[in-house]
Image (cartoon, rainbow, N blue to C red):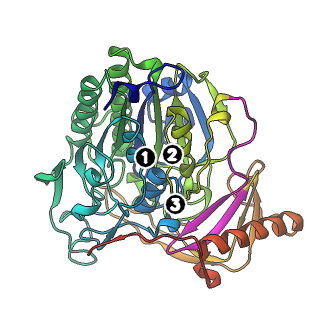
């Protein structure tokens, strides 16, 4: 990398980027977002020093699709990724897509991922083929192993591999040390790259079930094992922030904390909380997509602010591109920069509306301003069901929404009062936005094929 690559046009060094991404964490599972019994002092301090988004959305409420959107700036159905990949998946994130890591690597950044990948476990789809210089972690969800409670009846998983770059260095039978190991790798990476711009991606496997915590935090929370796990993740955030401070990098580092989707409610006391929002992981309701989001950049962002303008994971890549002076991907993306909003120089959010897809290209909802319109579809719920306990899942029931319903999220964040009949003009305008999106990316429920979709990567 040439020295010139380290310098922005104004003569400054491009800021470092740290992206901390948890798995299945509910909106309320952070102290500053309302957790009543989980202590998160480091995340609360990060929020006090940064900006908190109260209407931030994952792009899809399930693992692989959500991660694809985060790293590419695209709705996942645009790039042919749906749901969650199983081990030995024949498809993955197409290497032809430009990831956040590749975009920053072209700008001269060192890049690393420590944690969960879940965008295809074939060697051609793994992190070192997608712009990352270093990788330590697991290739898919931490429950895809022989100790799954439904192993032998629903699943037949092989051993869970732990990777160092492109080599399997272990097969896990205990995950209690994994959060600590990921944290230690992250701190070491910061220490080694303090003289060079870097992108550090920390996608924690926790608090996705099965829950594991080290002895440092076991039994420390009033919220049981789930709370212990969140407390250890908070400790990890604190270690990363301390490493930045120790190396004099605080003012020139963007740190983002968020999660991939809402809580996996079938697991009961081993799941988090999306309150005050409705439903959780795997649904287009607010509890499935709305996530805690904190961004800290002491050199550029005034701390202690809360913004309620909607922003989605697809907007993160173009936002970071603007912050770092990077070149956007050549192929069309869906995200738009939220940097002016975050700075407080622009009142509206970056997009006119956001679209909530599920399954294989099913458009379930659209949000514009305070209004969210849902289209007829079938969704899963634990309402009226017995939730799971201590790592065993309960069974969902499935409900079909027969007619469109409209909610005003400012007045009714829990989505309890359908106001479609009282606001036909809003229904009509949101339907028109949805129809325009269907022309672009399709909607299987309407029998509409998208015209701008790209393919996922497939094995040769």
Tell me the residue that label 2 is attached to: 317
Quadrant into which the C terminus falls? bottom left
Q: Distance between the residues labelled 2 and 1?
A: 6 Å
Q: Does the magenta stretch include residue 101?
A: no
Q: Report the residue at 61% width, 56% height from top.
A: 286
User: Residue drawn at (73%, 34%), measured in percent from left and top?
Assistant: 346
The answer to whether mark 2 and mark 1 are in CB contact below 8 A is yes
Residue 422 point in image, percent of width and height: 89, 65
Q: In this view, does 453 lie to the left or right of 455?
A: right
Point out the image quarter for the N terminus: top left
In the rendered structure, the answer to whether residue 381 lies left or right of residue 38 reads: right
Dot 1, how many residues are within 10 Å of its Cα: few (below 14), some (14-19), or many (20+)? many
**Residue 34 in view in this figure:** no
Point out residue 382 in the picture as x, y percentages from the top left corner: 51, 66
Front position in the image: 115 or 209:
115
Q: Residue furthest bottom?
A: 447
Mark 2: which secondary structure?
A: helix
- Front residue of 6/132: it is 6
The residue that mark 1 highlights is: 100
Residue on which the image places disc 3: 60
Label 1, secondary structure: give it.
helix
Residue at 28 percent across and 54 percent down: it is 129
- Picture coordinates of residue 102 (x, y %)? 38, 47
Q: Give whichever of 236, 124 is nearer the camera.
A: 124
Instruction: Measuring from the top left, give residue 356's x and y in whole percent.
Output: 61, 63
**What separation in Å lies between label 1 and label 3 (alpha carbons)?**
18 Å
Determine whether, in the image, residue 388 is placed left or right of residue 301.
Answer: left
């Amino acid at each position: 990398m040439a020295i010139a690559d380290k310098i922005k046009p104004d003569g400054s060094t491009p800021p470092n980027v740290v992206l901390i991404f948890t798995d299945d964490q509910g909106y309320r599972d952070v102290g500053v977002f309302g957790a009543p019994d989980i202590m998160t002092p480091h995340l609360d301090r990060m929020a006090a020093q940064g900006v908190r988004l109260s209407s931030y959305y994952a792009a899809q409420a399930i693992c692989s699709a959500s991660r694809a959107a985060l790293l590419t700036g695209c709705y996942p159905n645009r790039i042919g990724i749906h749901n969650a990949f199983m081990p030995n998946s024949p498809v993955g994130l197409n290497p032809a897509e430009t990831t956040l890591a590749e975009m920053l690597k072209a700008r001269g950044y060192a890049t690393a991922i420590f944690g969960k990948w879940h965008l295809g476990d074939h060697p051609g789809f793994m992190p070192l083929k997608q712009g990352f210089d270093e990788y330590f972690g697991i290739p898919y969800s931490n429950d895809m192993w022989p100790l799954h409670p439904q192993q032998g009846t629903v699943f037949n998983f092989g051993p869970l591999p732990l990777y160092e770059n492109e080599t399997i260095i272990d097969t896990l039978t205990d995950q209690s040390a994994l959060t600590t190991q990921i944290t230690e790798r992250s701190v070491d990476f910061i220490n080694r790259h303090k003289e060079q711009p870097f992108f550090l991606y920390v996608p924690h496997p926790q608090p996705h079930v099965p829950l594991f915590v080290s002895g440092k935090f076991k039994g420390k929370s009033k919220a049981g094992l789930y709370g212990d796990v969140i407390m250890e993740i908070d400790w990890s955030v604190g270690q990363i922030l301390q490493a930045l401070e120790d190396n004099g990098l605080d003012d020139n580092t963007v740190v983002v904390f968020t999660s991939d989707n809402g809580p996996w409610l079938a697991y009961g006391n081993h799941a988090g909380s999306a309150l005050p929002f409705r439903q959780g992981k795997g649904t287009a309701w607010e509890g499935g997509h709305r996530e805690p989001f904190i961004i800290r950049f002491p050199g550029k962002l005034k701390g202690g602010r809360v913004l309620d303008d909607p922003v989605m994971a697809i907007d993160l890549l173009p936002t970071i591109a603007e912050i770092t002076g990077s070149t956007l991907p050549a192929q069309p993306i869906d995200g738009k920069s939220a940097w002016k909003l975050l700075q407080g120089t622009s009142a509206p959010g970056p997009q006119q509306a956001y679209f909530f897809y599920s399954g294989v290209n099913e458009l379930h909802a659209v949000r514009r301003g305070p209004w969210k319109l849902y289209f007829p579809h079938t969704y899963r719920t634990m309402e009226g069901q017995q939730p799971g306990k201590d790592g065993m899942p309960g069974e969902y029931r499935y409900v079909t929404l027969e007619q469109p319903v409209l909610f005003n999220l400012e007045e009714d964040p829990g989505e309890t009062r359908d106001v479609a009949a009282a606001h036909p003009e809003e229904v009509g305008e949101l339907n028109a936005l949805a129809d325009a999106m269907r022309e672009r990316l399709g909607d299987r429920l309407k029998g509409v094929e998208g015209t701008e979709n790209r393919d996922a990567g497939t094995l040769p």
